[in-house]
Amino acid sequence: MTPDLQLTNLEMAQQLGLTEEEYQKINDILGRVPNFTELSIYSVMWSEHCSYKNSIKYLKTLPRDGERLLVGAGEENAGLVDIGEGMACAFKIESHNHPSAIEPYQGAATGVGGIHRDIFTMGARPIAALNSLRFGNLKESHTQHLVEGVVRGIGDYGNCLGVPTVGGEVYFEDCYNQNILVNAMSVGVVKVGETVSAIADGPGNPVFIVGSATGKDGIHGATFASADLTEDSADDLPAVQVGDPFQEKLLLEASLEAIKTGAMVGMQDMGAAGICCSSSEMSAKSGTGMRIDLDKVPTRQDNMHAFEILLSESQERMLIVGHKGQEDALYEVFDKWDLECQQIGEITDTGYLEFYRQGEKVAHVPSETLVLGGGAPVYDREFTRPAYMDKIEAFDMNSITEPSDLKSVAQHITALPSIASKRWIYEQYDSMVRTNTFNTNDPADANVIRLKDSEKSLVVTVDCNSSYVFADPYKGAMIAVSEAARNIACTGGKGVAITNCLNFGNPYNPEVYYQFVNAIKGMGEACRKFNTPVTGGNVSFYNQTVDKDGNIPVYPTPTIGMLGILDNPEHFTTLSFTDAGDILIMLGSHVDDINQSQYLRHFHGVEHSPAPEFDLDQEFVLHDVVRDLIQAGICKSVHDVSEGGLFVNLLESGIKNGLGFNISLDNSVRKDAFLFGEAQGRVVISLSASDVSTLTDIVGSRSNFSQLGSVTEGDIIIEDEQWGQIQSWSEEYNNSIHRYFKN
């Protein structure tokens, strides 16, 4: 008997990541003991990565309705938002954390390829990519190796595919030393009504596999992503896929052309869990079944077992259902693009997936039982407040001695890897391909992509300060959503929807699950406030390292990818100062707060402190005020205060045009809090002196504001003390990270 048909037992199930309860449920569903192929199918489809079994209860509490939504969360491969003028935007963010930690180049590259396929599978052309990255201590050679590999993987794949990488974020904290986070986001556009669904309608219709041949790379990748990283995880390297961006470019163009033939019923990317995932999800959505002959699947290796073909996560592949009688139209398109298009089966009305290999039926499972809402398990884990929060509550700012040499503090913070310019990273990405990127040479708080033949532009950003979420999951997640919305507002746009990538530790750890539950609650509240419904995304649990000291979870990192719209290109606003003599105004209040600041964490070495000051209602009003000021045409630059505090905000605004700043301190708050605190809800605006009265009229009593000082020719002056020229600060800021990779 081949391994495919071998009858299974509990030990085998547990080796594949299933529990005793789940194995018994599979026996009950089938009415018999599953064979190894069937058990393998359930093990990946019921993994956390595919089933969301430990998260779906709380995900369903997030706001998922909005007037602009054409496709909501979980309905298709990505969310779809009406952006006006007959156009729609498909966008989504997903993780590729464990593969990138084991094999950084291919892990990151295939993460980029997979998220773009989610977009063009719907019929949308990807026009922009973003990423959110977390690494460990940059002084460690292992971290440097991971950074180099991930950045090359993202750059090589995106550059070859011809999709610009327009923005992102990078943080460095020790908790990510081994379990890094690589979150990739894709944004695409399509005409309303020209999308395609991941459905399998019409018994008798043919089923095709198109694109690359199937190999042994990525087998049980979804299971690999649903377990802790250990010292032995390198042994799971076969679970990491290998990508080919040139093949993906052909697949992109061919897929979009094939949709236009009208010969296609449905299409789905073969991502996690490969053929078994795409076939089960498409069938379950339509209430149909499939009969698949695995002998017809083009393979790269001889003598592959059925379970290997079914579970392979080889990249650049699609499952397509066509209209019977119109097969030639599909063959013609894919032949034109020199891509394999092979019919491997047909749709049935049985509701079952039937897989055959060498004339034998190797699996017979009801498709609905493999997916959420069918037979996949749903859990509600216990959770408890983390013990470390006692230390957070005990923090007293008065225990921190205020340094006498604030200039030295500023120099230290400016060079921190999480603060310093990421130029060494983003210069490896092509941000200008397709010539739609608005602000390549004009840095802004968010990233703007032109829509050709339209006055509108898309504004996109990814944001999350995970140390805030660590300190207070509820407030920290609200801040993540709010910062994304604030960044879009500071650029002149308005946020309309989000996608999220929820990176947490092991859900069976009650303290980790507490972080997850409360982060979801905070995210939901902020999304409702800003009217930015959640269109979908990804949950990534098991982000922790198991070593001799036990389980070490990463900081809870609910990354927010937000889509906004800029209706008028004249309202696009950068963060850079433009003219010496301009007045600097800060909207919001100075606060005696150094909580969770880079200053407190990395100058004083204090990890445990509360999340920074934040008020959701005030934040909401602030965004309206910022947009009103921009639309009035008086803002020369707009930049929010975030990591590094006010000093870093001003420094970043001065660097591009070599302009400095002269500011006075507010004696009602500590000097270190004034310069380096990260209290939220603050935005700095530069404007002509003649426009200050207009600003006063527009702001009125809606928001507090104060005059900080003015823009200079290049001097940096703090409270009448000369801190040097912007050029010298710029050199340190721009070159700090590069020095780690100079060899």
Image (cartoon, grey):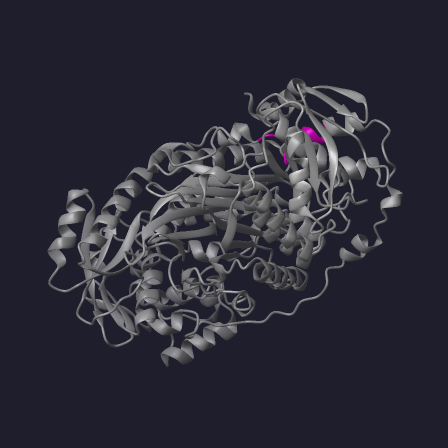
Magenta residues (range)? 412-421
| Quadrant of the drawing holding the C terminus | top right
Tell me which corner region of the image, top left, top right, bottom left or bottom right, holds residue 2: bottom left
| Pick the front one: 694 or 89 | 694
Q: Is residue 88 left or right of residue 658?
A: left
| Pick the front one: 385 or 615 | 615
Q: Is residue 109 visible?
A: no
**Does 604 appear above or below 214?**
above
**Does 470 appear above or below 350?**
above
Q: Position of residue 597 (x, y in %)?
A: 73, 42
Query: In terms of secondary structure, what is the magenta stretch mainly?
Result: loop
Q: Position of residue 333 (x, y in %)?
A: 16, 48
**Does 477 appear above or below 291?**
above
Q: Is residue 597 found inside the magenta-colored segment of the image?
A: no
**Does 160 appear above or below 618?**
above
| Pick the front one: 194 or 660 | 660
Q: Residue at position x 68%, y 50% from top?
A: 468
Q: Residue at position x 49%, y 45% from top?
A: 460
Q: Position of residue 703 (x, y in %)?
A: 70, 49
| Quadrant of the drawing holding the N terminus | bottom left
